[in-house]
Amino acid sequence: MHKIEIDDQVYALLQQHAEPFVDRENDVLRRLLGLDLGPEKAKEDRRPGGDLMGLIDAKLLIPGDELIHVQSRKGRTHRAVVTADGHLRLPDGSTYAKPSPALKACVGHDINGWGQWTHVRSDKPLQALRQKWLHGSAE
């Protein structure tokens, strides 16, 4: 293994493309360069794809994208990150194959994750992205 030095600007860019609590700098560089992620990611590769996999395949989501749910009256914002295998990863490191159970883990009751998670990059609910994928409609 070789060591390299990078400046603060490059490091900040790597952080923008990283899956929080998962990726190391080398993982991000491998993904950005289109290289195999290697044996350290083999565990996730063996896990069945989550419900977001179709949206990733359609390029509507990319691994590392952030999802949020804002509870305005309670003053709370919940976050999740899209993983490479179509799951949602919460800040505590737990992962969920489906949006609704992930959001239930955050808010404490049953809730429609497709309708309530918002994709930060597009500012659209997951449901809108799913409809675009299912119906091939352009917006």
Image (cartoon, rainbow, N blue to C red):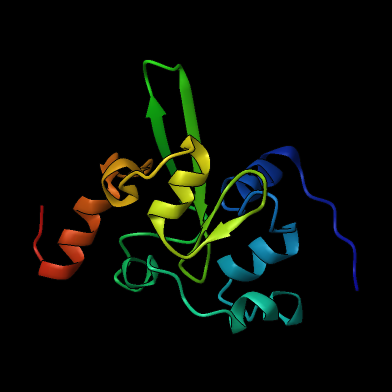
Tell me if 5 is positioned left or right of 72 in this view. Answer: right
Residue 17, x across and y down, in percent: 57, 52
Q: Nearer the viewer, residue 1 or 39?
A: 39
- At a point 42% along the width and 61% down the height, the residue shown is 98
The quarter holding residue 103 reads top left
Tell me if 120 is positioned left or right of 82 in this view. Answer: left
- At a point 23% along the width and 60% down the height, the residue shown is 130
The quarter holding residue 122 reads top left
Residue 70, x across and y down, in percent: 39, 28
The quarter holding residue 7 reads top right
Q: Quadrant of the N terminus?
A: bottom right
* 9 lies above or below 84: above
Residue 107, x across and y down, in percent: 47, 36
- At a point 90% along the width and 69% down the height, the residue shown is 2
Number of marks in the rendered image: 0
Q: Nearer the viewer, residue 123 or 5?
A: 123
Residue 114, x across and y down, in percent: 29, 51
* 30 lies above or below 39: above
In this view, the residue farthest toward the front is 109
- At a point 34% along the width and 49% down the height, the residue shown is 113
